[in-house]
Amino acid sequence: MTIPEPAEPTSVKGAPAATPAPAAPAAPSARTDLPVQGMTCAACVRRVERALRAAPGVQEATVNLVTQRATVTYDAHATTPSALARAIVDAGYEVPGAPDAPEPTGAPDAPALVSATAPEAAAAGGATAPAPPATPATPGATAPEAPATPATPGATAPEAPAAVTGGPPPAAPPAARAAPARPRQAAEERAAALDAAEQREQRALRRDVAIAGALTAPLLVVGMSHGAIPALDGAAGRWLSLALATVVVLGPGRRFFRLAWGALRHRAADMNTLVSLGTGAAWLYSTAAVVAPGLFPHAAHGHMPPVYFEAAAAIVTFVLIGKLLETRARKRLADAVRGLMALKPRTARRVRGDAEDEVPADALARGDLVLVRPGERIATDGEVVRGASAVDESMLTGESMPVDKTAGSAVIGGTLNQSGALTFRVTRTGADTALARIVEAVEQAQGSRAPIARLADVVSGVFVPVVLGVAALAFAAWLAAGPAEGGLATAVERFVAVLVIACPCALGLATPAAVAVGTGRGAELGVLVKGGAALEAASRVDTVLLDKTGTLTSGRPALTDVVAVEGRTEAELLGLVAAAERESEHPVARAIVEGARGRGVAVAPASAFRAEIGHGVEARVSGRLVRAGTAAWLGRAGVAADALEAEAERLATAGRTPSFVAVDGRLAGLVAVADRPTEEARRAVAALKELGVEVAMVTGDRAGAARAVADDLGIREVFAEVKPEDKARIVRERRAAGRRVAMVGDGINDAPALAGADVGVALGSGTDIALASADVALLRGGIAALPTALALARATLRTIRQNLFWAFVYNVIGIPIAAGLLYPLTGWLLSPVLASAAMSLSSVSVLGNSLRLRAFGRREAA
């Protein structure tokens, strides 16, 4: 598996110090992820996004309610992650832990799978950090030799020019030199900080739910006893209810008032506004009815005005229970990332000389030697220097069989050493490892937004004001109905019920919950989707264009045919030619040797080996002179190949490469090799057809070879001998015809087409450029994982639509009932207590529906 390397760091060319008013260098684009706590609904998401987009230098800001994370792309000369965190705090929300360091992004139309990191200090006020030495960049790490030059906002750049390409960075003046840039937080550190914050939130919620539940239970008993308990009837019961409800509303319920006040200070409204207005109105009305009953018209008739203490307390309790269930469900959404990170061992056995010492895995540095015993996981990426073993790499490659490792073999952090002891040299650490980069890519995908979420965004922008208006209208209508319909008491009850049932939690969770589960499940299945937009585009794909070599085929020739003459058997002929080819490094020679061994044919030693590049080889095998090569080359040696010319032509037409064989100067037969389709390709094409997807092949290979592979796989449409720019043209033509196109490839020549398709799909075994240009990476299973990727995308979008449908329907049906619109026809009125329970259950149902995606399995042909 290949994980794309980030681009080399680019030096900045600055003007000499003597030049007046030097032109400012191009602003580097950076990205950071910030944890956000306190968001409860889609309105909160919009408020945080508005606050971030209003900050100087912010180019794009996306906030995810499910993952509780803000992803911000910004001008690193204009702002810093710390300033962005302050903008979130000023909007009334919390940012636990330190913000990440900035992270340069790739080109818009060719996003890198995982981006590199830039120094944060350069973002202080327009100064440019000196370029580090020309060494390859590593994701998530910054070069410690690259100090940043601080600047104050509005100040001119310091006199020391930026580093000039090709030379070492000039030394900054001592007074201007800043501390080295802080490396980006590793994925596991971010996860640990968020996990700790989630645990604190869950502890607080459990405490509040316990208190609220314990006090609400007797409140419900008092409120529903209706005189059945004499001791609780009359003034005593009302004062007891006031005491219990006050503790619940102003104790566990204080969080809603605090957050609602924060929203009000920013002239905004959200779910907390609705809950606090509803519970506050019920509690204030009931308190006034107990403390000063003479203010109400009921007193003139000798009746005590009704109270809604149990409703106010029950609303707080049910909403808190819903939030507790919601946080637990959100924790499950991150299982894929947590499961990947759990593969990394905490300690490693470092070897220095003859001594071994156990150190934290994070303390390893490049060049360290590490000993791994059987049954232990490999701590980080490296290269074996001694020992031999079999390593289980299934967690990253999907390969069920262990992979043999000897000196010079690469090992991947998190994989399981099985049979023997290995000593390897560390080549990558921390955020640069393959495992960390996959985790980061999954995190970014889970935090992204699908375009279908725009509908929820538009609705949430006007939802809360509309609900407040509906609640006010309901209050006015019931108040105008007069005492015959309950008067003020019923008006307050309807006002509270509308506010509570309309909380837009489910609407805000509908899309991000499904995207988070879908991308997480994809990672578990070896399908890496780069965000919600890619997921939605993949769900609509109806045409797949497939490269041939390395995508549908293995990319290397394999033995296909053995044709013997002169009474020889195929096994005898194959044994002779394989022995002659044994010393050759040519791919055709390797295919013949491997084919012979695969068929159980013994390969004898050979002598007097000689090869003529482009023509053939000869060697002595068991005393006989064996030649294998082209017909012309054998002809120059006096061997006529006319008897097999027709057979060779037939094989060549079928896309195979024939080699003639002569033994002791006489034609003995021919062997043929070809780059044949893999079994994974057969399954993939069949499964794609079952999904109703049109399949075509686009390849630069010869027409005969391409047609042979296509016929073998059942692909009808073939574009052969196509140049890279023509692949992109074919993609454009299909899209112009109204097709939703996915292009699948693994090479550099596929990158333009991958970037131009609706969905670019790269194989994990492909080149870094192909992976960087793609929207979806198939990290394991090869092309066989493509139907799984498309089917998962369809299932995820279907889940999003279901979530949005039920979130909208819930409010469309619930709000009129809560307002009492059906009362004249049916006599139905929805109590505030039931409204609060329904509101909480709606959010949990959306999360539960999204979590069904975790049961999604691989898509195979029937």
Image: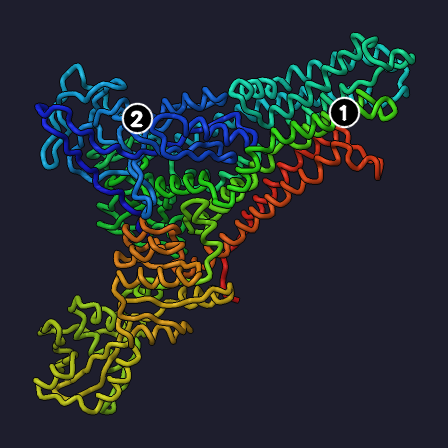
Q: Which residue is mark 2?
A: 78
Q: In the image, what residue occupies the spot 72% across and 31% down? A: 835
Vertically, is 862 above or below 351?
Answer: below
- Which of these two is toward me, 227 or 275? 275
* Residue 519, disc: none
Res 751 → quadrant: bottom left
Q: In the image, what residue occupies the spot 45% across and 19% down? A: 90
- Examine the rendering and report whether any part of residue 423 can be seen: no
Q: CA distance from mark 1 to mark 2?
A: 51 Å
Q: How many marks?
A: 2
Outermost residue to the front:
480
Res 367 → quadrant: top left
Vertically, is 550 above or below 461?
Answer: below
Q: Which residue is mark 1?
A: 493
Within 10 Å of disc 2 (Cα), the crowding (few <14, some 14-19, many 20+) is: many
Q: Earlier in the sequence, mark 1 or mark 2?
A: 2
Residue 35, image x and y in percent? 44, 29
- Which of these two is toward me, 9 or 156? 156
Tag 2: amino acid: Ala
Tag 1: amino acid: Glu
Res 302 → quadrant: top right
Looking at the image, residue 225 sits to the left or right of residue 659; the answer is right
